[in-house]
Amino acid sequence: MSALIWKIACNEWRRLWHARVPALLMIVLVTLWGIAALAAHHHWQDHAQTVAKVTARSQHDWQSQPDRHPHRVSHFGDFVAKPVHPLSVIEPGILDQSGHLVYLEAHRLNSANFNPATEATTLGRFSLITPAMIVQWWMPLFLIMIAYATVTADKITGILAFMRGNGTPGWVIAAGKWLALFLPLLLLLCLQALLTLAWSWQSDQLLARLALMLLAQALYIAGWCLLVVTVSWYSRQLHSALLTLLLCWVCVCIIFPRGLANLAQIAYPTQPRAEAEYHAESKLQSIGDSHNPDDPHFQAFKQSILNKYQVSRIEDLPVNYQGLLMQEGERLTTAVYREQQALHDAHLAKQNESIRHWLWLTPALALQYIQMAASGNDLPHHQAFIRQSEARRYQLIQYLNQIHTYKVDQHDDKNTRVSADFWKNAPRPPVNLPPMAVSHASLTAAFLVLIGWLLLPGSLLVRVSHRL
């Protein structure tokens, strides 16, 4: 049977090639993919160079600081760059919208900024065509235009009835037609994966992420090939097959993804950043104001410090009270801002959860979830980056506050300068790309959808292939 399946596939390839229009469409698809790959590669290189320059400049500026007061250093601040995986060439995900640099400073939890989507001009706001977009949107559309008549035409001309009359099983014909459609597209996906592997083979976590992306893309395209053969087998006329498949493409690739995203935003709206900062500042004022000498919280804090060192006046402390005050103020500020960040993340998690409940409607969105997770550019990866950045910020600021406490004379606080060696040895741990496990919920739901995407048209094809 395998030889017969291959023969049917070869005959289908020969027919498509001699039809000229399907062959031309395939050439256009490959050309479009090549243009998208080159454009995405240029975009990624430009982005990576910008991040590298800013990071190097920030490192140089930090190390070049002279002897100065520790609190001035804490407000001088530091930059941290988001790790960008080479698979971003295929799927940039939310990278252009979420930003890739975070400014770390005292008393603040800043969001990522320098995102190209907000810095683009009006004409530059069109979304970048990427290889992932080609696979997700354009490859199924070109597949429909190429192969909508693959079985319908054989039914109209009587070839299908002749093959069935000669004893060829329907499932063999269906398998041969499906193989003829799937193999060329799978070859293009494998070529994309091999080029990516050759270009970035030394990158962290590359093999696992690339294999996951390739598997998801293969399942997605295999499902579309099954759907095309199934609809073509069901249809009695060419135009009905084409219209049905185009309607499926519009719903799966455009209407359902956009509709689910809009419904999630309506159901679980996120708080504007300005409003969140206002609530944070209000809560800080109610908890304690370090600038108010009569504030109850800091009055109690002051008394606890005096009791700890068994003195009656701040001037008698063996350490700098202003440094201790900065440590306590930073602790309170950080707790409040982290609480606001957690509320924001919880709203985004509810949005994603609501989308995952209806993800079975659109395998295109399921594929996008997997591609973004594999390239490290989905929401969980970004949130992990923000958490690492915040941990680095808090560790750095409290280190500076400890220097303020133990190395600055409180009797001449404002005029004291501390050696620059302290800044050069400050704790600034690197921010690393998190593992794909941070996206396990999205990956699990998306793969279940893609498996169902294979089973549903596959079962319908097995059922209809018994008919003439």
Image (cartoon, grey):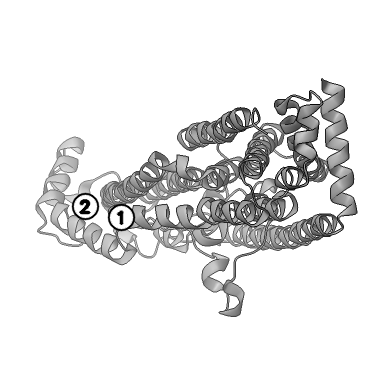
Give the mark, 2 or 1, whose residue is nearer the N terminus: 2
Q: Residue furthest top?
A: 1
Where in the figure is residue 253, as x and y percent of width and height? 55, 53
Answer with left or right where residue 175 lies relative to residue 350.
Answer: right
Label 2, label 1: how far apart the Cα atoms are: 8 Å
- Residue 66: quadrant of the picture: bottom right
- Relative to 383, does residue 420 appear above or below in the rendering? below
Answer with left or right where residue 330 lies relative to residue 120.
Answer: left
Q: Which residue is mark 2?
A: 315
Where in the figure is residue 455, as x and y percent of width and height? 57, 30
Which of the labelled discs sits on residue 66, or is there none? none
Answer with left or right where residue 388 lies relative to residue 213.
Answer: left
Q: Which residue is mark 1?
A: 410
Q: Is residue 160 visible to the viewer in this orientation of the structure? A: yes
Residue flagged by tag 1: what amino acid is it? Gln
Residue at screen point 72% across, 40% down: 203
Residue at screen point 74% across, 45% down: 150
Q: Is residue 202 visible to the viewer in this orientation of the structure? A: no
Depth order, front residue of 355/225: 225
- Residue 234: quadrant of the picture: top right
**Under tag 2, what secondary structure?**
helix
- Relative to 227, does residue 66 appear above or below in the rendering? below
Depth order, front residue of 22/63: 22
Depth order, front residue of 107/364: 364
Residue flagged by tag 2: what amino acid is it? Glu
Label 2–label 1 contact, CB within 8 A: yes
- Relative to 405, does residue 178 appear above or below in the rendering? above
Residue at screen point 20% across, 56% down: 284
**Under tag 1, what secondary structure?**
helix
Residue at screen point 57% across, 43% down: 367
Residue density around tag 1, few if under 14, some if 14–19, many if 20 or more, within 10 Å: many
